[in-house]
């Protein structure tokens, strides 16, 4: 069998940096996204106010991402 050449790994570049090479980037965003969705949903279930739950969800995403990034780094 002929060996197929390997495709170079696809990367995601933000501001000229490959985010796959940044330590803690993946885990920070995964925890931030899941925390934001979870807290946003709980806020919506508790208050039934979409505007408030959206703001709370985004705020918890932002704070959770920054907090995990700072502890990991």
Image (spheres, grey):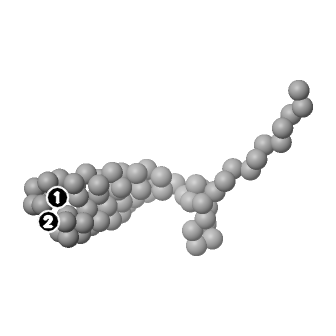
Determine the residue positioned at 56% across, 60% down: 19
**Secondary structure beneath label 2:** loop
Disc 1: CA contacts within 10 A as few (<14), some (14-19) or many (>=20)? some
Give the residue pinned by disc 2: 49
Determine the residue positioned at 23% across, 58% down: 40
Image quarter (top left, top right, bottom left or bottom right) of the N terminus? top right
**Secondary structure beneath label 1:** helix
Q: Are marks 1 and 2 in contact (CB under 8 Å)?
A: yes
* Name of the residue lying farthest toward the left: 47
Give the residue pinned by disc 1: 44
Task: First in sequence, mark 1 or 2: give its number.
Answer: 1
Q: How far from the left and from the top, in percent, is residue 50?
A: 19, 66
Residue 71 in sight: no
* Apparent side of residue 43 relative to residue 64 in the rendered image (left or right): left
Q: Is residue 59 shown above or below 41?
A: below
Q: How far from the left and from the top, in percent, is residue 31?
A: 36, 51
Image quarter (top left, top right, bottom left or bottom right) of the C terminus? bottom left
Q: How far from the left and from the top, in percent, is residue 9?
A: 69, 50
């Amino acid at each position: 069998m002929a060996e197929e050449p390997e495709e170079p790994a696809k990367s995601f570049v933000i501001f000229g940096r490959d985010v796959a090479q940044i330590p803690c980037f993946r885990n920070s965003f995964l925890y931030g996204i899941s925390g934001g969705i979870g807290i946003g949903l709980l806020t919506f279930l508790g208050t039934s106010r979409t505007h408030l739950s959206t703001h709370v969800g985004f705020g918890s995403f932002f704070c959770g991402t920054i907090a995990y990034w700072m502890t990991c780094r």
